[in-house]
Amino acid sequence: MGMQLHTCVVMLQLVDEFIPTLDKDDPTYAVRMQGLEQMKKGLATVVAGCIQSLRERDAYQDSELKRLIGYLVETLPVIYPNLPEGTRQEIPIRLQAIAKDPKMRGLIPELGQLRIALEKPE
């Protein structure tokens, strides 16, 4: 999951370089922009999957979840602004609910770091 998040960051950096080079008068411009929106939906799916994994306490050890949160702290500030609006609104709510879960007590410091990282998107 960490590799996938880091790949998303690289992809977004490349998109940021590529989009300004597109000719808005090109007949394929609208299709390309639709593709960009589809990519953003894919990013939302990746992030949602990572956040869902945080709740899977039976499948992952604390050390693994802490590592995943670390990957999210590193990458989500870049990914977050590119997500669809609904996903951007949902993520802090889901993270807050996770932090309130008594089973997550051992991850509170890391979840706090993630919350701080989201408040300072790049």
Image: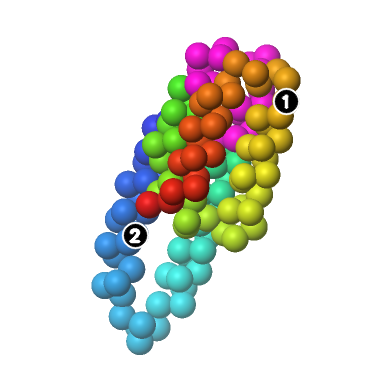
Tag 2: residue type? Val
**Circle 2 is placed at which residue position?**
15
Tag 1: residue type? Asp
Label 2, residues with CA under 10 Å away: few <14, some 14-19, many ≥20: few
Q: How many marks?
A: 2
Magenta segment boundaries in residue numbering: 50-66
In the rendered image, residue 69 lying in the magenta stretch gets the answer no
The residue depicted at 32 percent of the width and 61 percent of the height is: 16
Can you give x and y, in whole percent of width and height, for residue 38 in the image? Answer: 53, 60
What is the spatial separation of the Cα atoms under label 2 and label 1, in whole angstroms? 37 Å
108 or 53: nearer the viewer: 108
On screen, residue 84 above or below 4: below
In the rendered image, residue 60 lying in the magenta stretch gets the answer yes
50 or 22: nearer the viewer: 50
Q: Is residue 23 left or right of residue 109?
A: left
**Circle 1 is placed at which residue position?**
101
Q: Is residue 37 left or right of residue 51?
A: left
**Residue 39 in view, yes or no:** no
